[in-house]
Amino acid sequence: MAPTGFTVEQLQAQIPRLRRYARALTGSREAADDLVQDALERAWTKRTLWRPDSNLRAWLFAVMHNVFVNGVKRARPMASLDALNEEGSIEPVAGNASAETDAILRDMRVALAQLPVEQRQVVLLVGLEQLTYAEAAEVLEVPIGTVMSRLSRGRDRLRQILDEGAGGPGLRRVK
Amino acid sequence: MTMRKGLSEEVLHAYVDGGLSSDERGAVEAHLALHPETAARARAWASQNEALHRLFDPVLTEPHSFKVGGARRASNAPFFWRNVAGLAATLVAGVAIGFFAHDYWMPDGTAPRASIARQALLAHAAYVPEVRHPVEVTAREEQHLLAWLSKRLDAPLKAPSLVQSGYQLLGGRLLPASGGSTASDQASPVALLMYENAQGKRLSLVVRREVPNNDTAFRFAQEGRNAVFYWVDGPFGYALVGDVGKDELATLARLVYQQLNP
């Protein structure tokens, strides 16, 4: 008889989104998948702590956030700008985007890497993962006002970096 | 909701993130019409969200091999294959990836005909649950959408109207390249058009380049709750997928077919 909590199926169903967030947060497939694997293990161990009347996805994001913050097992930095620049391609959409889209997306990827991690988290949880502001606040364990101000600063900072041309030759300056 | 000079940042974010009612949106848009700088800010934020989705949505459908707790225990061993129909859509997507990946890597020259159906089921399951970003380009920019997808597919693409059946075009997106196994169609992109009816039920029309052949028969497949009709017509293969009954889907598929062959 399984203890209370969620089922393996419910957990499995959340993997694609955990993985999408982790990939955007860390900027690297390897680091992201390590993060997701650690979060899945931790979530399963702690599954009795989840309240069945609450949003499982937000709870899992919170678990993953803690794993990320603690960096318990592996402390991998965000993929370096140099690495991103040398990579020169946008892995997830390779073969799929026009040169123009490629450039826009490459700029975005580089700009994201330059964002302070607190702002990057909020921009991603809200803009990519479509969490409500209240859910994002819960995941990050900060007041909702902090979420809003980080969101404003993050989005404006991204805009500024993108307007300055993140992918241009000027990139070398910022490393 | 009244808005004079000030528009709170929170409301502006909510506008960009789709968190406002249509009345509230109208009020914000009226404000933005008078404040171009704020409007530019909102547009920049919205295009950031779009770029993030374009960058990272493909991760959703990547095959993976995570070990989920308990999955290896004997008592749980067959969990993945039990009651597939009842599982969450994303899990169905996971199962579909298995089939799809098989097609994808077929070593011999012929890409299996059924793979567009699988690709459609997979994409539909992955994107339909996205409440706010099911599509990359919305129907509000239909011309831009069709021009963009036509360019990527390298042939003119039309968006059939399903209005008479109650479905409005929601928009579209580009999917990762279909896995044709011959060199010529290795990187053939795939377009997805999504439709929605008043009850929020969604249909996906998946279109990709196919090697033209004489077999234009309608075919049907079902996976879980989602049904798919697929066929080849001229340079394109089409698959219409949705969580609707076979008869209704057949009617819709005929509607699509007729409009593409006036």
Image: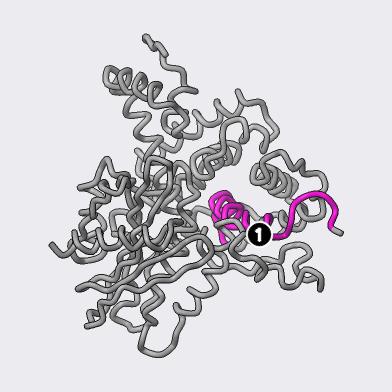
- Relative depth, front residue between A156 and B253: B253
Q: Is residue A89 visible?
A: no
Q: Against B175, is A108 above or below?
A: above
The answer to whether residue B239 is magenta is no
Q: Against B203, is A158 above or below?
A: above
Q: Against B166, is B86 above or below?
A: below
- Relative depth, front residue between B136 and A88: B136
Q: Secondary structure at mark 1?
A: helix
At 62% across and 59% down in the image, what residue appears? B87
User: Can you tell which quarter of the image residue B98 is in?
Assistant: bottom right
Q: Amino acid at mark 1?
A: Gln
Main SS, magenta residues: helix
Q: Which color scheme did the rendering employ for the protein?
A: one colour
Quadrant of the snapshot with the N terminus of chain B: top left
- Relative depth, front residue between B188 and A65: B188
Q: Would residue B162 appear left or right of B98 to someone viewing this image?
A: left
At 44% across and 58% down in the image, what residue appears? B124
User: Can you tell which quarter of the image residue B83 is in?
Assistant: bottom right
Q: Is residue B246 visible?
A: yes
Q: Would residue B67 appear left or right of B171 to someone viewing this image?
A: right
> What stretch of residues is rendered in magenta?
A2-29
The answer to whether residue A3 is magenta is yes
At 34% across and 66% down in the image, what residue appears? B239
Position of residue A76 measured from the top left corner of the image (x, y, whole percent): 66, 56
- Residue that label 1 marks: A12
Quadrant of the snapshot with the C terminus of chain B: bottom left
